Image (spheres, grey):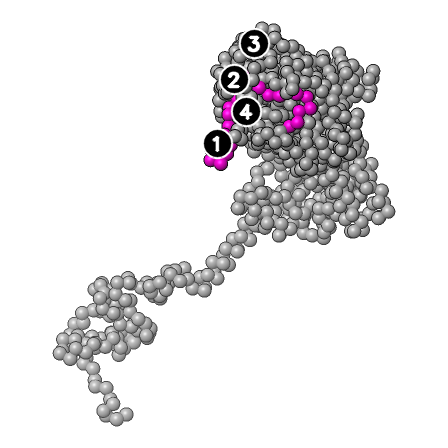
Amino acid sequence: MSEHRRKPPQPQEGGRAAARRGQSGSSSGRRAAPRGATESPSGSHAGGGEDRPYGGRAEARRAAQRSGGGRRRAAEPGRPGRRATPAGRGRAPDPGKKRIVDYPRFDRYGWRRWVPSWKLVSGLCVGFFGAMVAAAGIAYAMVGIPDEAKTATAQNNVYYWADGTQMVSTGGERNRQIVDLSRIPKEMQNAVISQENKTFYDDSGIDPKGIARAVFNMARGGDTQGGSTITQQYVKNAMLDDQSQTISRKVKEIFVSIKVGTKLDKKDILAGYLNSAYYGRGAWGIQAASRAYFDKDSEDLNPGECAFLAAMLKGATYYDPAGATSIDSAATPEANAKRALLQMQDTLDKMVEYKHLDAAERAKYSKLPKVQNPRSNTQLSGQIGYLVDLAKSSLIKNDVVTSNQLEQGGYSIYTTFDKKKVEELEKAVTKVYKENIDPKKRPDTDTDVQFGGASVNPETGAIEAIYGGEDATEHFTNNADVTGAQVGSTFKPFVLAAAMKWGVRDPDGPEVQGEDQRTVVSPKSLYTGKNEWKVKNYDGSVWQNEKGEEWLQTNDGDANASAGKAPDYMIDLREAMRESINSAFVQLGMDVGLDKVKQAATDSGLLEDSLAGTTFPSFSIGISDPSAIRMAGSYATFAASGKQRDPFSVTKVTDKDGTIYTHKVDTRQAWTSKVADNVTDVLKTVVEKGTGTNAQLTGREVAGKTGTTDGNKSAWFVGYTPQLSTAISMFRYPDDENIKNREFLQMYGTGGQESIHGASFPSEIFKDYMEDALKGEPVVKFPKPEPIGEVVNDEPSPSATPTPTETEETESASPTPTPTESESEEETSPTPTTSETCGPWDWGCEEGSDGGTETGDEGDGDASESPSSSASESEEAGNSRGNQNGGIFG
């Protein structure tokens, strides 16, 4: 190496550090060389020289760190190119100190320190999945295999009367008997496998996609879902100790299903499922279901019956041919039977497709098998079964508890039902039936006669009594809740209320905001009582249907109003209500507007889906079919001076943890007291001197209205005192679901009477019941009504018409019934059935056909027919309970 390249010897005293310090004080301004750049490996300095300020590199480094840092540190030995920590960014960790988790990262600065390394990410993933596997292993080890012998256990639900005494304890008893798989027909096994889980014998017992879908739905608050495989469904049925629909429960089901799938034989799983599944009618397991539906042992089931029971596993509420309208109005016997047949046929087809059933054998089962009466619990006989069903359906519909939760039991349910009133109502109906109805003596007129009834407290809306039928274990449609029987003239008070609230339209008056001016009417207003009245629109033009045909409205017995004078027989509305004159209320409804009449009915408490369409004038005279409960509740609105409260049947529900539900009375002012009290005053006239005289009570004021419908197919009386509102219905309807196209039957000659009216048996039942139900109650009078409205169509009154406070009338009633046709908004008007309504060019009109007008004593006039060349489809709807309206309470 040349001489000029040789480095000069370093001074021995102080080393390079001293040299660097010396140079730093020079004027050259050159930066000192990094520490230790030429130090010996030992890091020591030669002795005998000047003392060094620091004893070594470590001490120098610590000193530099203590000095704080505006300066950039030099690179450390062995780490060439390392940048010093920038000023203000803190110090880097000591590289000599080992850390288990290098986070934040010691060799990065700024935001890079917070970016995890791939090693850290990988480690965390491995750790997470390892923990999951460990947790799954622990969960798998902890869960047990269900024992079907211990499944389907539950507590009773206890129902209480309104006074707090126990009514019945029911629901916890389990109708179930375990049978060996050998006693379950192969067809039943294959029906369930074909419909529910065709890969049952090959799958692992769980459906990952179905599980993920169920968990996702529950996580976002959607509906819960059951298991997708038979194994999962068996586990779900068996886990009755925990019926909560949560993600944790679903996860538990998964582990139990996995364990069941690995530990149990498929045949054992299938037997467990068939023995623990719920088939409806309180039947848990195939043996109980076979007895509940067919009264035979499971081993005797044929393929059609097996396919039918497999359909019940979808949910008996919507597949049991007996129906479940108390829970859902869509679950009618007819609709359920249709669904069950479709499901049964689909199952049989799949059994053939999967080679489980011969096609020739399958062809034998094209119809539903005959099933027996659904009730077997003798505790639910008489009216108790109807009361329990009413309370249960109310809780389910109001989302207090679910149907499954009720099945598990453990609830105390406090009802509104008054034991005394329930017994008195049943006694009153039974008395009339035994004294007047004799199917053996009059089989053509007295068979299939049914009654319904309900009482509602006007002050609260509480349902205090119902009559659902002769016996809940024999007749399982609750006649108090929903029947499809039209209400006839008991609908007329809603027309009067609408006229006194909104008024009649005046086509000649000035328009107000685009609408015709209206005049609120007084009960003294005059309307036609003419028979065969040509119905007019409010502007005076003659009403016509879509075919251009006019409608002549008939009165009871083709009679003009007895108090009116020719040519139009004008009478005031009080007299029209007393005689139940159809023509007056049909025309009044047209003048008010049928939309307002409908609103009046719903404001009073009727359900909109129980009302017919407003296309035809007959809407005003009762072609709708609300339930007895709703009719009693709507009249209770008038009794309470316009305060409307929905009927309810449960006051409180408790479980082991305490009270979970308390009913709160919701009151709204549907009518002003002036309107409601005037309606009541007019209805008092009906009972005092009109069609409802049979309903008079000793020493008490009563308001009410009779009703009879087309073809004499139903009769009603609805009345009230200030303390209690009661509706009574009567009709003929076959109780055999195997009869196709069942319809309401005429009651001409029933009970030995020429025809049945609301003024006959229904009003008699009302009187007998109310006399006993109100015994001991204080006598309360109705409020004195204030004058209301103006007298429209003002002419000299042809009769002595009472003022709103008068109670005496000089005219006697001579009402007789006229039939009603049922229409709806989408349907054509019904075919005329009497010669009086047939015009000379009405080729489709047949004289003397079924459903003509009739004459009777103390009756009430109701709807007649409008001309049309086609029959009314809505009459078919009224004649079939499969098309009945109503939910709970109808």
How far apart, in angstroms, are the residues tagged by discs 2 and 4?
Answer: 14 Å
| 516 in relation to 263, above or below | above
Q: Residue at x 75, y 33 (%)?
A: 842
Stretch in magenta: 509-535
Task: Tell me if residue 515 is in the magenta stretch.
Answer: yes
Residue position marked by numbered label 4 in the rendering: 499
- In the displayed image of the protein, which residue is found farthest to the right? 360
Query: The residue under label 4 is which amino acid type?
Result: Ala
Residue position marked by numbered label 2 in the rendering: 677
- The answer to whether the residues at label 3 and label 4 have Cβ atoms under 8 Å apart is no
At numbered mark 1, what does the secondary structure look like: helix, strand or loop? Answer: loop
Query: The residue under label 2 is which amino acid type?
Result: Asp
Look at discs 3 and 1 and give the one toward the viewer. Answer: 1
Query: The residue under label 3 is which amino acid type?
Result: Thr
Give the quarter of the image for residue 155.
top right
Residue position marked by numbered label 3 in the rendering: 807
How far apart, in angstroms, are the residues tagged by discs 2 and 1?
Answer: 31 Å
- In the displayed image of the protein, which residue is found farthest to the front? 567
Q: Position of residue 825 (x, y in %)?
A: 64, 36
Q: Residue at x 28, y 63 (%)?
A: 89
